Amino acid sequence: MRGFVSVVPDDLPFKRDFVNSVLAIDIGGTHFRIALFDQLGRQLAISEGATLRSGGREWMLDEIRQRARTLLGQAERSAAACGISFGGPVDFRHQKVTSVHSPGWNNFSFAEWVDANLGLPCMIDNDANAGALGEFRYGAGRGTEAMVYVTLSTGIGAGVILSGKIHRGKDGLAGELGHIPISESGNTCSCGARGCLESLSSGWAIAERGREWRRRRGDSLASLGDSSRSRSEGITAKEIAQAASQGDPADLEIMREAARHLARGLLTVIRILNPDRIILGGGLTQAGPVLLDPLRESLSALASPTIVYSTEIVTAQLGAYSPLYGAAAMAVDLMGQ
């Protein structure tokens, strides 16, 4: 392996002219984004908001309808198609959301709803596959034939691109990196199994580990200067990372432990697929050195002295917008069908 968190040169120019625009929608657990792009992947306009989890599906659909119509009404070029990135399981073959953890969304035909309400042909995929496509077309994955986009957020997932195309597998479940077994210990995962990577290295796992430490120590987030919040159960992975960056020894160890498990998961991907590049995206990457430094150290410590891989591991060039750009790419592809 080489070049961990390296910078990918922006030297691959686009070649095509454009006429129409496309609509891209990204729905995540905390934020949603709706944007117009041209056919070259250049963002023309965007509307963003915070996801109101208590609002449910109908609130979200109303927000999308209103904001999308506003953007479409202001567009200089007519939109020809729509792409959606959804932060949860999606049945790509039948173009339906299948998320049982998001009330009201399970078995929802989102693409049909867009066609009926916005008058656009639509394609939907999960956020990991969308993020992979976004980085492959417009970000850190350009110039590769095989790459894996890993989303490190509340959960952990991956989008796999082989020979320039998203690899879905027989059941459409390829890329479930968060649910590969890493340890016999750990909390029960959202999938029902124990010891999954997601139960050890995800945002919710880091937050839960932080709560366990604080209950055990009777301690607080003193380094964050918020004693009232520190006594609550609402501690987040972001706060753990902030405390670690300020030198809290327990939180540093929590981040190191998460990085060690994550390294095992990434090495598994490298040894099975040997991709050109692994791209790390999602909110957890914002933790910076307190996660990425021990990850690099663990990758080096676990590397084989006799089997050497040249796979690069880099951070997402498009940042939090990788899935949105992937949604735009889906819409552009749909135009050509």
Image: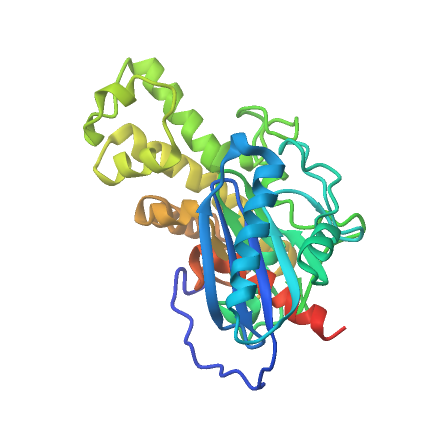
Please indicate whether residue 34 sits to the left or right of residue 11 in the image: right
Q: Which quarter of the figure has residue 241?
A: top left
- Residue at 69% in and 53% down: 117
Q: Is residue 198 above or below residue 151?
A: above
- Residue at 62% in and 42% down: 88
- Residue at 49% in and 40% down: 51
Asked whether the viewer can see residue 266, the reply is: yes
Please indicate whether residue 221 sits to the left or right of residue 335 in the image: left
* Residue closer to the observer: 4 or 163: 163
Residue 202: x and y in percent read: 49, 37
- Residue at 65% in and 31% down: 191
* Residue closer to the observer: 326 or 152: 326
Residue 228: x and y in percent read: 25, 19
Residue 261: x and y in percent read: 49, 39
Q: Is residue 226 above or below residue 259?
A: above
- The number of discs equals 0
Residue 187: x and y in percent read: 54, 24
